[in-house]
Image: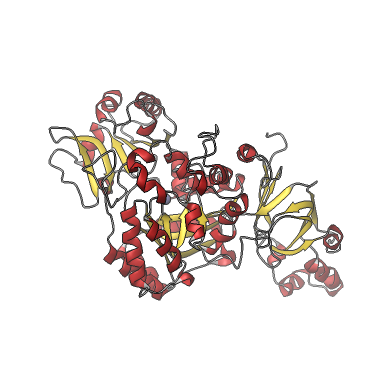
């Protein structure tokens, strides 16, 4: 991370202390640090691919063109990587994710893909056996939509399996949790507990909590569950950052962080333990926002940790029926979902953010969540478009058609996660009914309206691997190729549109497009070397296209071991 090349020339001269070395030193300063030779490069800023070589100097792209022109910049210390025709794209950017959440998820009981409640309980019981007495069991990733019985679970079976220690299991979307009886006892949750605003305790006929806490009801646990210590948190964050670098990500977003997490990021950066760039969005906490609005955005050294965004939540998620809808759920006629933040609060935070130089990203999933958000942003904008503010609708899953047009007109970015469409397509129509599907996961309608798409994964809700996101974006199919032709296939993205959404337009959505997102001379050398041409392989092979090298700021942060794959 730190080498002599980053030192100013005078410091080197002082260190060497003698003039005869001067000429050598200045030549070394001019020479390339790294040349990627004989490759196929997708610059993204211009269409198509070009064959040739790319030169990295001082962490930036110094040249992209013919092989001879590149080799003319080589010096004695230049590392040359022979690509042999392999493909290079700009480093992939995840515009909406939770890196610290991924770190925590990596050490929790993994419930992703569990095909039944019994399977969840089996995994929890196994994990519990290895923990110290009284310790909480934490798990993440259950999804009742995958079970034979798709209703929310009841804690009774879980309590029977693990009676003696508290259990907390977060749903796949992070918008609900299942707890056992011991946890409810510790947290003081019982029949007398009132539903908090923006949250709900699922109850049985007698009014007793079933153990499922939806949205803000999860805050009943605030302070009740002991968290990881500082060094453990940082270890988890580093683990997550190394993982995402290995799948080709060079910049990730962390949506909704507080002060402790920000300190963790900076500490890792300063210790050279953060291999990727991280753009942090502050969580909606009034004291946190006030202090950051007073001090202003921070981009930090080398654009490694950037703090200039605020995350708000308009509503919940579709899977737990917390997404706020204009009309009731098609499969739950008494339910219109949960509005978490209203127009006034959104407008107020947006106005202050504008004044302080921050951007706002609002989680909005249901059509009512989206319309309330756009009302708030439009108010803050005084009714005028404000593309330069780079405000964002996070998820933007179900929208009235007129709101898709309004979002594009206001210059608000559509922050989409293509995998959400393919994860939800099995049951979204039951929740929504046929009419609302016209504005559901409507990527091409957003483009046609003149909107800009920033793509991401929402990991750890979905896997972090951007190859899976690219695949979902261009196919709208499961990995098995279902349904044939893709779900609502008119909304599929082209390969170029998908790559742009994961690179240049994601960079735009983070105020990073001057620095990264395309293979242009002068930009920071963030890029990925793929084993094959991910832009032309058959779509079903996109997920298995090897990542051979990941570079951030010209530094190789991931190199595939020869033996793997
Ligand atoms: Zn998210």
Q: In which quadrant of the rendered view does residue 260 lie?
A: bottom left
Q: Residue 162: percent from the left, percent from the top?
A: 30, 26
Q: In which quadrant of the rendered view does residue 213 lie?
A: top left
Q: In terms of depth relative to the viewer, which is nearer, 258 or 50?
A: 50
Q: Residue 337: percent from the left, percent from the top?
A: 27, 48
Which residue corresponds to the image point at 50% horizontal and 47% vertical from the top-left? 418
Image side of residue 128 versus residue 13, left or right: left
Image side of residue 20 versus residue 486, left or right: right
Which residue corresponds to the image point at 66% horizontal and 65% vertical from the top-left? 523
Image side of residue 312 versus residue 530, left or right: left
Image side of residue 238 versus residue 556, left or right: left
Q: In terms of depth relative to the viewer, which is nearer, 285 or 453?
A: 453
Q: Which quadrant does the N terminus fall into?
A: bottom right
* Vertical position of residue 210 compared to residue 471: above or below: above
Q: Is residue 171 visible?
A: no
Q: Is residue 399 visible?
A: yes
Q: Residue 471: percent from the left, percent from the top?
A: 57, 43
Which residue corresponds to the image point at 47% horizontal and 43% vertical from the top-left? 488
């Amino acid at each position: 991370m730190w080498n002599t090349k980053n030192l100013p020339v005078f410091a080197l001269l002082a260190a060497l202390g003698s003039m005869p070395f001067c000429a050598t030193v200045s030549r070394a300063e001019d020479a390339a640090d790294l040349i990627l030779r004989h490759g196929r490069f997708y610059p993204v800023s211009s269409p198509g691919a070009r064959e040739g070589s790319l030169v990295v100097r001082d962490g930036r792209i110094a040249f992209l063109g013919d092989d001879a022109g590149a080799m003319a910049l080589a010096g004695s210390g230049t590392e040359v990587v022979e690509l042999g025709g392999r493909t290079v794209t700009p480093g992939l950017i995840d515009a909406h994710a939770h890196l610290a959440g991924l770190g925590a998820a990596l050490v929790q009981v993994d419930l992703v893909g569990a095909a039944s409640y019994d399977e969840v309980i089996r995994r929890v019981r196994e994990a519990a056996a290895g923990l110290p007495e009284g310790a909480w069991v934490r798990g993440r990733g259950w999804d009742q939509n995958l079970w034979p019985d798709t209703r929310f679970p009841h804690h009774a079976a879980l309590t029977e399996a693990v009676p003696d220690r508290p259990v907390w299991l977060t749903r796949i979307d992070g918008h609900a949790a299942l707890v056992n009886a011991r946890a409810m006892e510790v947290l003081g949750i019982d029949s007398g507990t009132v539903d908090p605003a923006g949250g709900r305790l699922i109850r049985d006929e007698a009014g007793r909590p079933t153990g499922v806490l939806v949205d803000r009801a999860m805050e009943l646990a605030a302070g009740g569950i002991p968290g990881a210590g500082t060094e453990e948190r940082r270890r988890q964050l580093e683990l997550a950052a190394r993982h995402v670098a290995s799948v080709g990500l060079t910049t990730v977003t962390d949506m909704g962080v507080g002060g402790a997490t920000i300190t963790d990021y900076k500490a890792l950066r300063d210790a050279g333990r953060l291999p990727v760039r991280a753009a942090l969005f502050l969580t909606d906490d009034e004291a946190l926002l006030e202090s950051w609005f007073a001090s202003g955005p921070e981009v930090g050294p080398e654009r490694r940790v950037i703090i200039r965004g605020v995350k708000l939540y308009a509503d919940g998620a579709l899977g737990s029926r917390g997404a706020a809808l204009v009309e009731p759920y098609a499969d739950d006629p008494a339910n219109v979902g949960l509005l978490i933040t209203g127009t006034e609060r959104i407008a107020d935070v947006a106005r202050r953010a504008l004044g302080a130089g921050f951007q706002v990203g609002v989680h909005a999933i249901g059509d009512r969540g989206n319309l309330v958000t756009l009302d708030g942003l439009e108010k803050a904008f005084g009714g005028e478009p404000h593309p330069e503010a780079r405000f964002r609708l996070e998820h933007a899953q179900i929208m009235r058609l007129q709101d898709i047009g309004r979002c594009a007109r206001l210059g608000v970015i559509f922050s989409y996660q293509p995998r959400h469409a393919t994860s939800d397509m099995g049951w979204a129509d039951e929740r929504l009914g046929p009419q609302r599907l016209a504005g559901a996961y409507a990527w091409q309608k957003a483009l046609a309206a003149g909107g800009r798409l920033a793509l991401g994964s929402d990991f750890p809700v979905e896997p972090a691997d951007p190859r899976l996101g690219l695949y979902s974006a261009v196919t709208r199919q499961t990995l098995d190729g279902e349904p044939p032709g893709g779900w609502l296939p008119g909304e599929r993205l082209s390969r170029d549109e998908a790559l742009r959404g994961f690179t240049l337009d994601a960079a735009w959505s983070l105020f990073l497009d001057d620095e990264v997102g395309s293979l242009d001379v002068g930009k920071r050398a963030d890029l990925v070397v793929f084993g094959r041409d991910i832009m032309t392989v058959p779509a079903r092979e996109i997920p298995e296209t090897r990542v051979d090298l990941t570079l951030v700021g010209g530094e190789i942060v991931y190199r595939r071991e020869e033996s793997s794959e």
